[in-house]
């Protein structure tokens, strides 16, 4: 078994996830690229290895419980502990529909990935996280996950009204607090982050920030010292309102 600190990033084959994975690898971690598409995952791994970084593929679909627990069992055979878990995988199906027009099947699919995915992944990999010296869990939220911001007319986040995506991120913030309360006595810190308006496939590359810029806050939370916060919601300008 390798003695390097270990990190797992879900949805890490592109965009912010890949940028986070690269940042962690550059910080000295062995990074596991969590991806449901093995060929895309291997491409991301090759990209990191070409840069002289340590990475490997861990095939998992956050929306599939069997896939997640199978991946956790496989990783348990490879490493003694997991130091960092970044729940980054997320989807948006149709951001053009008004709330009254959102199909229930689409809303359920968004929740399956954006909300239930981080819960099942955290639960599945928690035994490995508990074996780490100071485990860190980061939930990739969004500015629209803040009820304060989406109801503040001075905030850019109040200008959008995505029923399924927004509510999934609001709920994810609550999930973050729940896990943080449970795991704080164990020294495991759990925080939610919002990356800002990043150019990704999720928004048709309409954002203003690069994936590397969007990854910065997640990396900061992943690398927290023992005196760092837990159970918070953070962005590039610090703590964000719930």
Image (cartoon, grey):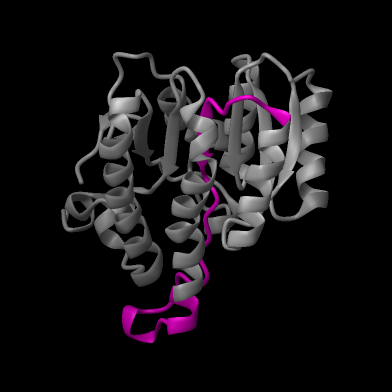
Task: Look at the picture and state if 1 lies above or below 64.
Answer: above
Image-quadrant location for residue 15? top right
Label the magenta part by its dominant secondary structure: loop
Q: What residue lies at 28% left-to-right and 61% top-to-bottom?
A: 159
Q: Using the image as rendered, state which of residue 205 and residue 229 is in the foreground.
A: 229
Q: How many marks?
A: 0
Q: What residue lies at 24% left-to-right and 58% top-to-bottom?
A: 158
Position of the N terminus, as image quadrant, is top right
Is residue 32 toward the left or the right of residue 190 in the image?
A: right
Is residue 99 toward the left or the right of residue 239 in the image?
A: right
Image-quadrant location for residue 125? top right
Q: Position of residue 169 (x, y in %)?
A: 36, 56
Q: Tell whether position 127 is magenta.
A: no
Task: Look at the picture and state if 138 lies above or below 220.
Answer: below
Q: Is residue 14 visible?
A: no
Q: Which residues are magenta?
A: 78-107
Q: Position of residue 101 (x, y in %)?
A: 38, 85
Q: What residue lies at 46% left-to-right and 29% top-to-bottom?
A: 130
Is residue 109 toward the left or the right of residue 228 in the image?
A: right
Q: Position of residue 4 (x, y in %)?
A: 66, 15
Q: Using the image as rendered, state which of residue 213 and residue 166 is in the foreground.
A: 166
Q: Tell whether position 101 is magenta.
A: yes
Task: Look at the picture and state if 143 lies above or below 66.
Answer: above
Q: Position of residue 90 (x, y in %)?
A: 52, 55
Q: Is residue 25 visible?
A: yes
């Amino acid at each position: 078994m390798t003695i390097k600190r270990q990190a797992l990033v879900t949805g890490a084959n592109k965009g912010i996830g890949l940028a986070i994975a690269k940042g962690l690898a550059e910080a000295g971690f062995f990074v596991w690229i969590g991806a449901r598409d093995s060929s895309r995952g291997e491409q991301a791994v090759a990209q990191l290895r070409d840069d002289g970084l340590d990475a490997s593929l861990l095939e998992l679909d956050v929306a599939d419980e069997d896939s997640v627990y199978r991946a956790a069992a496989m990783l348990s055979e490879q490493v003694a502990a997991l130091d960092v878990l970044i729940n980054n995988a997320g989807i948006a199906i149709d951001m053009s529909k008004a709330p009254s027009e959102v199909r229930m099947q689409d809303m359920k699919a968004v929740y399956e990935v954006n909300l239930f995915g981080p819960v099942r992944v955290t639960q599945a990999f928690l035994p490995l996280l508990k074996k780490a010296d100071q485990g860190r869990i980061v939930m990739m939220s969004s500015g629209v996950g803040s009820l304060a911001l989406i109801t503040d007319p001075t905030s850019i986040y109040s200008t959008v009204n995505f029923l399924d995506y927004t509510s999934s991120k609001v709920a994810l913030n609550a999930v973050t607090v729940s896990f943080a309360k449970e795991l704080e006595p164990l020294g495991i810190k759990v925080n939610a982050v919002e990356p800002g308006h990043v150019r990704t496939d999720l928004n048709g590359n309409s954002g203003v920030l690069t994936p590397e810029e969007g990854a910065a806050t997640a990396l900061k939370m992943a690398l927290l010292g023992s005196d760092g916060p837990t159970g918070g919601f953070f962005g590039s300008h610090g703590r964000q309102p719930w």
